[in-house]
Image (cartoon, grey):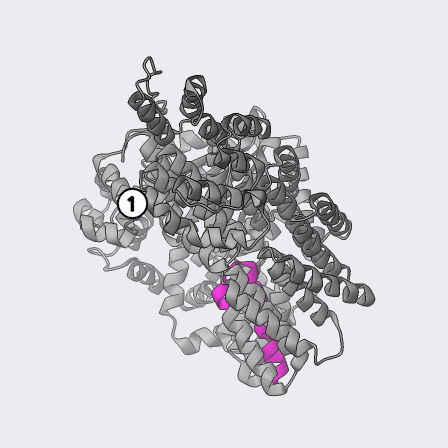
C-alpha cells in the first residue's frame, strides 16, 4: 500500500544518513502508537538509502520475560564476526558493548543499525544502547530505534535510555495518524466510505490497511475482527500455522512449525500469499504485531496451553540448537508446566541478572514464586532474597523491603539466625536508601545483635561495616571509627577484601572531619584496592566521598579532580547511580564558584538520568533549589520543598544542613527575617552537635542575620566567622581566594561605598536578581547616586512557537497539576495531554517537567 504523509519523516532520516556518511554518527528515534507505520517507514528508508550501507536489523519480542540481548543475538547472525561468542559466554555487558562499538567504529562502510519495538526491550539491551548512544559520534553509524510511545509510561525502563541519548546527535521522529484526506485517497479503490473509515480508525494506518484488506462489506467493529475475518478465510492447515505462530513472539522457525504440525508446503505459502505472515530469516512472522495478538487473544485457554506445551516440548528436544532460557520459561509458564518452570526459571533469572537485565530477572523470580508451595522453605527464602536484591538494583525499594521481610519470616520459622541477621543488615541498607535513617539504624542494631550469637563470619563483618557506614553518614566519629575498625579487623581475618574496602572507606570518610589529610589518604587507599579488584560499586562510592568531601570543604581544585576522574569512570561503566550523585556535586561546585549556567546544566542532567533515587538525587536537587533562590526564580519554592522533604528523614547534617541554609536565605531575600530562626533551627541544632565548620558557618550566618546571638565563632569556618564579626574586608578577601563570588559580594555589601558598588556589580554579573535588588534599594536609601542600571536577564533563543493550547498546558504544569488533573480541567483525554506535553518538550528542547518549567520561565511563557 502507498506510503502517505511520511515525506518529511523520510527526508529527516535521509538528512541524518547524509551526516553519518560524512563522518559522524547519529541516532533516529522513530515513535508512535501501535500500527502507526514505524516499520513501513523504516523499510521504505532502507529501500531508498540502504543500498549505500551495511544494514543490520533486530527486534525485541513480547516474551513473558524478554530474552537478554535478544535483538543483538538476531543481528549477530547477519554478520561475519565473533559476536555470538561474547553473547553466549555471558562475559558481561561492558565486554559485549565494547566489541560492538569497535565493530561499528572499524567498519569500512557506513552502517545502519535498526532495532525495533524497544518498548519490549530487556534491560541488558537498553544498557548496550546507552553505551553506544554515548559514543555514537565516534562511528559512521545511523542507529534507528523504534518504539511505541503509547506504551512507554513515565517509569518505563526505556525512559532512562531516551533521556540519556545525546540531544545534539538524536533525531526524534514521531509519526502522526493519517489525515482524512490520506484515508480518502486509500479508500478510493474500495467500496468503503472514507468518512466512515476515518471515523472508525482515527487515521491509524494499520487499522486502515487491515480493514481494506479484509474485503468485507461495511467496517468491522474492531481491528481484531478484521484480522479474524481474514484468518477465517484460510484453509484449516494454514489456520493451524497461524495459531501456532501467534504464540511465538517475534519469528516462528520453520523447523518448529514442521516439528509440531508437519504442514504441507502449500499451507505455509498460503499464509504468506494472503498477507498474514512474512518470511523472516529461517522462519515466518506476522506482518503486524497487532495481528498476532488478535489471533492469540482469540484462542481458547485449553487450545493455548496445549500449543504452548507442544512448543516447549519441541524446544527442549532440540539438540545442537541454542534456545534461550527466557523463551523456554515463557512457554513453560503459558503452558502451566510447573516442573519446567521450576527447573529453568532459576537459571534464566541468573542469566538475566548476569547480563544486567534486572527487570527481566524480577519477572522470572515472580514466575517462580507462583509455585512456592512446591518448594522447600530454604528455596523460597533464597528466591525472595534474590528478588529483593534485583529490586534494590533497579531502585524498587519498597518491593525490595517487602520481599526481604518475607524472606526473614521464613528464616525465623527455620531458626536460621545467621540468615536472619544478614537480612536485617540488608533492611538497614534499604531503609537508608529510602531516606529513613531511624529505621536503618534500628535494623543495623538488630542484625549485629543476632549475628553476635553466631560464629564470626562474613555476615557479621559486613554488619559491623554497615553500622560504621550509618554513623559515618551521620557524622558521628567515635561509633563510626569503632565499628569500622572492628569490621576491618574481622575482614582481615576472613581475607574478605570487599568488606575491608567498604569499612576502610567508612573510616577514612569520618576521619576527614578531624584530620582531613589522613582521612583522605585512607579513602584513596580504598579506591586503589577497589580498582585493582574491579569492585565497581566501591570505586564509585570512593569517588563520591572524595568529591563531596572536597567540594563541601571548599577545596574546589581537589574536588574538581575527583569529580572529573569519577565521572569518567562511572560514565564508561554505566554506573548511573554514582553518575547522578557526582553530577549533583559537580552542580554544587559550579554553583558555589559562580558558574551558574553550568551548575544548572549538571543539576538538570542528574534529574534527567534519575529514577527517583532519594539519596542519590539530593545533591542535584539542593544545588538547583539554592540556585533558583539566588536567581529569584519561582521554581525555587517547590524545589526547596522537595529537598526538605527528602533530607529531613535522613537525620544527616550533610543532607539537611544545606537545605536549611538555602531555606533561610530564601526567607532573608523575600524579607521574612523573623522566620529565619524557626526555618533554620533544626539544621542549626544538628550542626552544633557535629564537627563540620562549613555547614555550621553557613547556617550560623543566616541566624546572625536574623539577630540570633551566642554563635560559637571558634567552631565556624573562618570566612563566615569574619563576616559575623564585622570584618568585611578580610572576609571578602578570604572568599575571593576560595573562589566564591556570591559570598564575597555579601561581605563587600557590608563595607564602604566602593565595596558596596563592587558587591552590586558582582550580584549583577551572577544574575543574582534578589540580592541585587536588596543592595540597590539599600544604597538608594543611603542616598547613593549614579548606580549602574539593573540588568535584565538575557533574552533566550526563541524555540518553535508553542500553540495557545500548549502554553495553557505548560502553565497548568507550572501549577503542579498532574496529567489526569490537566485532562480533567481542560476536558480532554490524558493521551491528548501527553501529546501536548511531548510537543512542548520537543519545541523547548527539554526532556522533563523541571526543564520545561525552567525554559518556559526563561522565555517568559509562564
Q: Quadrant of residue 851?
A: top left
Residue 52: give x, y in percent of width and height: 56, 30
Task: Please tell me whether residue 612 is drawn above or below residue 795 in the rendered image.
Answer: below
Residue 769: give x, y in percent of width and height: 36, 29
List the single residue furthest toward the top. Answer: 786
Query: Can residue 602 be seen in the rendering of this structure?
Result: yes
Q: Quadrant of residue 259?
A: bottom right
- What crowding class fits label 1: few (fewer than 14 Cα within 10 Å), some (14-19), or many (20 or more)? many
Instruction: Locate the N terminus by quadrant.
Output: top left
Task: Please tell me whether residue 552 is drawn above or below residue 10 in the rendered image.
Answer: below
Task: Please tell me whether residue 314 is drawn above or below residue 359 in the rendered image.
Answer: below
In the rendered image, which residue does mark 1 sit on?
A: 813
Query: Can residue 313 be seen in the rendering of this structure?
Result: no
Q: Nearer the viewer, residue 147 or 37?
A: 147
Q: Is most of the magenta stretch helix, strand or loop?
A: helix
Q: Nearer the viewer, residue 219 or 135?
A: 135
Residue 502: give x, y in percent of width and height: 70, 58
Residue 42: give x, y in percent of width and height: 45, 40
Decide if residue 38 is on the left or right side of residue 111: left
x 45%, y 49%: residue: 159
Q: Nearer the viewer, residue 81 or 491?
A: 491
Magenta highlight range: 375-399
- Was residue 184 drawn as part of the magenta stretch in this picture? no
Q: Nearer the viewer, residue 847 or 371?
A: 847
Instruction: Locate the C terminus by quadrant.
Output: top left
List the single residue furthest toward the front. Answer: 710
Decide if residue 498 is on the left or right side of residue 466: right
What kind of element bears circle 1? Answer: helix
x 21%, y 35%: residue: 804
Q: How many marks?
A: 1
Q: Quadrant of residue 172?
A: top left
Amino acid at each position: 500500500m502507498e506510503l502517505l504523509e511520511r515525506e518529511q519523516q523520510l527526508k529527516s532520516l535521509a538528512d541524518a544518513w547524509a551526516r553519518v556518511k560524512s563522518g559522524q554518527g547519529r541516532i533516529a528515534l522513530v515513535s508512535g502508537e501501535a500500527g502507526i507505520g514505524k516499520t513501513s517507514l523504516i523499510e521504505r528508508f532502507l529501500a531508498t538509502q540502504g543500498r549505500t550501507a551495511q544494514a543490520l536489523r533486530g527486534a525485541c519480542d513480547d516474551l513473558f520475560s524478554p530474552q537478554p540481548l535478544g535483538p543483538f543475538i538476531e543481528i549477530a547472525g547477519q554478520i561475519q564476526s565473533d559476536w555470538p561468542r561474547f553473547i553466549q559466554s555471558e562475559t558481561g555487558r561492558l565486554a559485549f558493548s565494547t566489541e560492538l562499538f569497535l565493530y561499528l567504529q572499524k567498519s569500512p562502510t557506513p552502517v545502519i543499525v535498526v532495532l525495533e519495538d524497544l518498548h519490549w526491550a530487556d534491560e541488558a539491551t537498553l544498557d548496550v544502547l546507552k553505551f553506544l548512544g554515548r559514543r555514537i559520534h565516534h562511528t559512521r553509524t545511523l542507529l534507528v530505534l523504534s518504539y511505541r510511545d503509547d506504551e512507554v509510561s513515565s517509569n518505563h525502563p526505556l525512559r532512562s535510555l531516551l533521556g540519556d541519548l545525546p540531544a545534539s546527535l538524536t533525531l526524534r521522529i514521531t509519526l502522526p495518524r493519517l489525515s482524512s484526506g490520506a484515508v480518502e485517497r486509500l479508500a478510493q479503490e474500495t467500496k468503503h466510505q472514507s468518512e466512515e473509515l476515518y471515523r472508525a480508525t482515527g487515521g491509524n494506518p494499520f487499522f486502515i490497511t487491515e480493514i481494506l484488506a479484509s474485503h468485507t462489506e461495511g467496517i468491522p467493529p474492531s481491528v481484531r475482527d478484521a484480522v479474524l475475518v481474514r484468518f477465517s478465510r484460510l484453509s484449516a492447515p494454514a489456520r493451524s500455522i497461524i495459531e501456532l505462530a501467534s504464540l511465538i513472539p517475534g519469528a516462528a522457525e520453520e523447523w518448529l512449525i514442521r516439528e509440531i504440525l508437519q504442514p504441507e508446503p502449500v499451507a505455509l505459502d498460503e499464509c504468506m500469499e494472503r498477507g498474514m505472515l512474512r518470511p523472516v530469516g529461517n522462519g515466518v512472522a506476522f506482518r503486524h504485531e497487532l495481528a498476532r495478538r488478535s489471533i492469540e487473544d482469540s484462542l481458547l485457554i485449553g487450545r493455548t496451553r496445549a500449543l504452548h506445551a507442544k512448543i516447549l516440548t519441541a524446544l527442549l528436544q532440540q539438540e545442537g540448537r541454542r534456545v534461550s532460557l527466557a523463551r523456554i520459561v515463557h512457554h513453560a509458564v503459558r503452558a502451566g508446566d510447573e516442573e519446567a518452570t521450576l527447573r529453568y526459571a532459576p537459571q534464566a533469572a541468573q542469566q538475566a541478572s548476569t547480563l544486567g537485565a534486572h527487570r527481566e530477572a524480577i519477572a522470572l523470580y515472580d514466575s517462580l514464586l507462583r509455585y512456592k508451595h512446591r518448594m522447600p522453605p530454604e528455596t523460597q527464602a533464597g528466591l525472595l532474597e534474590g528478588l529483593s536484591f534485583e529490586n534494590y538494583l533497579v531502585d524498587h525499594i519498597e518491593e525490595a523491603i517487602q520481599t526481604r521481610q518475607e524472606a526473614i519470616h521464613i528464616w525465623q520459622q527455620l531458626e536460621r539466625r545467621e540468615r536472619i541477621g544478614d537480612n536485617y543488615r540488608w533492611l538497614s541498607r534499604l531503609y537508608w536508601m529510602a531516606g529513613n535513617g531511624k529505621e536503618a539504624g534500628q535494623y543495623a542494631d538488630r542484625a549485629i545483635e543476632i549475628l553476635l550469637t553466631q560464629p564470626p563470619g562474613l555476615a557479621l563483618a559486613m554488619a559491623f561495616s554497615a553500622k560504621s557506614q550509618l554513623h559515618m553518614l551521620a557524622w558521628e566519629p567515635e561509633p563510626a571509627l569503632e565499628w569500622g575498625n572492628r569490621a576491618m579487623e574481622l575482614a582481615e581475618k576472613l581475607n574478605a577484601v570487599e568488606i575491608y574496602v567498604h569499612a576502610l572507606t567508612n573510616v577514612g570518610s569520618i576521619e576527614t572531619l578531624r584530620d582531613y589529610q589522613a582521612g583522605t589518604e585512607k579513602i584513596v587507599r580504598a579506591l586503589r584496592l577497589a580498582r585493582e579488584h574491579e569492585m565497581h560499586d566501591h570505586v564509585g562510592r570512593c569517588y563520591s566521598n572524595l568529591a563531596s568531601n572536597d567540594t563541601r570543604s571548599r577545596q574546589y581544585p581537589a574536588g574538581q579532580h575527583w569529580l572529573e576522574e569519577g565521572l569518567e569512570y562511572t560514565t564508561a561503566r554505566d554506573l548511573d547511580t554514582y553518575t547522578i550523585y557526582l553530577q549533583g556535586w559537580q552542580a554544587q561546585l559550579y554553583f558555589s564558584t559562580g558558574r551558574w549556567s553550568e551548575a544548572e546544566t549538571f543539576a538538570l542532567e542528574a534529574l534527567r538520568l534519575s529514577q527517583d533515587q532519594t539519596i542519590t538525587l539530593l545533591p542535584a536537587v539542593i544545588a538547583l533549589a539554592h540556585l533558583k533562590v539566588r536567581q529569584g526564580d519561582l521554581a525555587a519554592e517547590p524545589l526547596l520543598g522537595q529537598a526538605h522533604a527528602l533530607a529531613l528523614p535522613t537525620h544527616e547534617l550533610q543532607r539537611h544542613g544545606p537545605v536549611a541554609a538555602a531555606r533561610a536565605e530564601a526567607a532573608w531575600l523575600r524579607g521574612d527575617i523573623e522566620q529565619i530562626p524557626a526555618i533554620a533551627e533544626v539544621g542549626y541544632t544538628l550542626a552544633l552537635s557535629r564537627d563540620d565548620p562549613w555547614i555550621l558557618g553557613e547556617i550560623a550566618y543566616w541566624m546572625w542575620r536574623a539577630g540570633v546571638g551566642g554563635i560559637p565563632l571558634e567552631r565556624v569556618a573562618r570566612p563566615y566567622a569574619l563576616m559575623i564579626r564585622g570584618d568585611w574586608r578580610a572576609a571578602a578577601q578570604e572568599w575571593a581566594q576560595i573562589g566564591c563570588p556570591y559570598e564575597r559580594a555579601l561581605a563587600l555589601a557590608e563595607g564602604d561605598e566602593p565595596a558596596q558598588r563592587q558587591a552590586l556589580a558582582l550580584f549583577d554579573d551572577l544574575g543574582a536578581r534578589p540580592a541585587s535588588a536588596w543592595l540597590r534599594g539599600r544604597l538608594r536609601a543611603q542616598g547613593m547616586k549614579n548606580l549602574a542600571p539593573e540588568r535584565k536577564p538575557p533574552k533566550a533563543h526563541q524555540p518553535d512557537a508553542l500553540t495557545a493550547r500548549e502554553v495553557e498546558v505548560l502553565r497548568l504544569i507550572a501549577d503542579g497539576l498532574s496529567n489526569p488533573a490537566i485532562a480533567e480541567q481542560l476536558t480532554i483525554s490524558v493521551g491528548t495531554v501527553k501529546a501536548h506535553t511531548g510537543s512542548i518538550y520537543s519545541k523547548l528542547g527539554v526532556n522533563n517537567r523541571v526543564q520545561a518549567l525552567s525554559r518556559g520561565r526563561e522565555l517568559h511563557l509562564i
